[in-house]
Image (cartoon, rainbow, N blue to C red):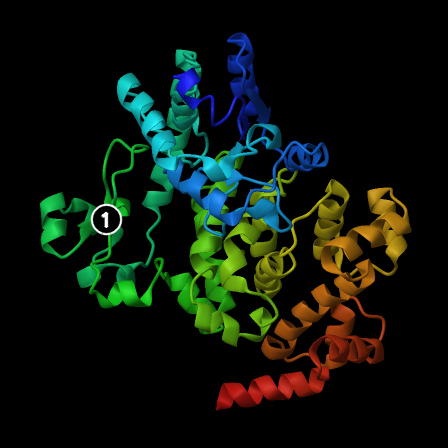
Amino acid sequence: MMNELGKYSNEIIWMANNGKLLHDLIAAKQSNLTIFPFDIANLTKYSEMNILRPLSAEIIKQLHRTMWQPALPIFARDETFFGVPEDISFYGIIVPKKQLEDTNKWDWDELRSLINKNYKENNIDFWSAGATNNMGFIYSVLGAFGINIEAPLKETIELKENWLKAYDWLNSIEWDWEEFFINNLSPLEFKQYSSNQKLEMGWTKAPPNPFNNYQDYNFFMFPDDSSVKKRFDFCIGSCWASIKNNMPDQVINDLFRIILDYKNLLKVELRSATYFNINKKLWKDKAVLKAKPLYKHIDFFNNAKNVVYSNINKMQHHDIRDILLKTLTNKANNKIFFSYLEGLITTGKTFYKSNDLQTAIEFITTNYQNINQIKDITDYLDCSQSHLQSLFKMSFDCSCWEYLNKIRVDIAKNELVYNSQSISQISIKIGFKSSVTFTRVFKKNTGSTPSEYRLSKKTKKWQ
């Protein structure tokens, strides 16, 4: 098998969030494949070492289709987000530059058939479908390249149970998904129907997915002629309806309930679940999003999924549950937290290139009211002002102070609409020393004064 695949690649670098276990397994077998822990810094390091080949979008799509599973991406170095298509998450493969000089000549059908052949011959249980660990998929492709690994039974069972726990948790949430289903069936109701009943209702089975050994409602597709298919790409839940109707309190309450109900989740599961919830609520209606002022300056529909995930994934050194609970238990902070969620999306458009930038953004986002000078940020980071300014200029094409003011202005917009406090009070609340400075900065960023902005929103609301 290795000889058959030799013309495609002699080495594949895998990135996995459980890198230590995988690395030990590979090292024990003296494999030609090297496995690294999943880490943003590693991606940057490998890129700087010129290991990665800047694959074209078409090559990425071909590799993606070859490997079957949307949750298991192929990474490639590119100008934006490593060239990863918008519908792909972080877990996956890094293809080294030196082995892939002739990818345009690859026979994709042959490669697919070889991997599929290994899957059938080894009767591998593909229980890990891209939620927490992709062990089954990794074993299959390693086997396709002639490397067979026998995972320790105890660790394999723990990984499987860990993934199933997260999967069951996600499916236990009582989503308001009625619009997604024909005849207003809830997910649990829909799951109770047999496959034949679903087919009789007009649903069609999704293409076979070798990474799942059972079928449930996730693997049925919309009838081609249904109004549901024409209207929605994904489920639109009650939280998204709340966002469209400018009801951030309801969004916060829903998230708060979910977090409290499942407060004992493992950290990685909570991070995945938080991404899942925010993504389902925010990455939805292209027309509505582009009509909202907050999203006019970015192509939200194409970037939101990656951006939301990347921001949440960068919060690894925090206890995400405590951050959310601390914010949500204070009712007065609800609107600020809603703005913070929006800020994660709007400010995360650029892929962060250093831990300093990541830490600076987190510090600014959580301390914007109390930052009086750039030195407050550099002291926290223990870095020079020139280094900090270069990071923001390179990633956001603005200075660090301009970035801070944009965060303050985004929060001020929310305060002006939902808060009856005076402009002077709001300016002090969000960190400005005077209302004059606040007005000047606000107009520079929005084109209107705070008074004009508040009046326009109130007028539009009454209309």
Q: Name the residue under label 1.
A: 220
Tell me: residue 249, above or below residue 208. below
Tell me: residue 404, above or below residue 290. above
- Write the residue at 45% across / 48% down: 276
Tell me: residue 378, above or below residue 454. above
Question: In screen coordinates, is 208 left or right of 26?
Answer: left
Q: Say which of 31 and 392 sits in front.
A: 31
- Write the residue at 73% across / 45% down: 359
| Residue 37, visible in the rendered structure | yes
Three-letter residue code for mark 1: Phe
Residue 118, quarter of the rendered image: top left
Residue 343, quarter of the rendered image: bottom right
Residue 355, quarter of the rendered image: top right
Question: In screen coordinates, is 217 left or right of 167?
Answer: left
Tell me: residue 93, above or below residue 338. above
Q: What element carries label 1?
A: strand
- In the rendered image, residue 328, in percent from the top left (x then y), is placed at 56, 55
Question: In screen coordinates, is 450 left or right of 401?
Answer: left
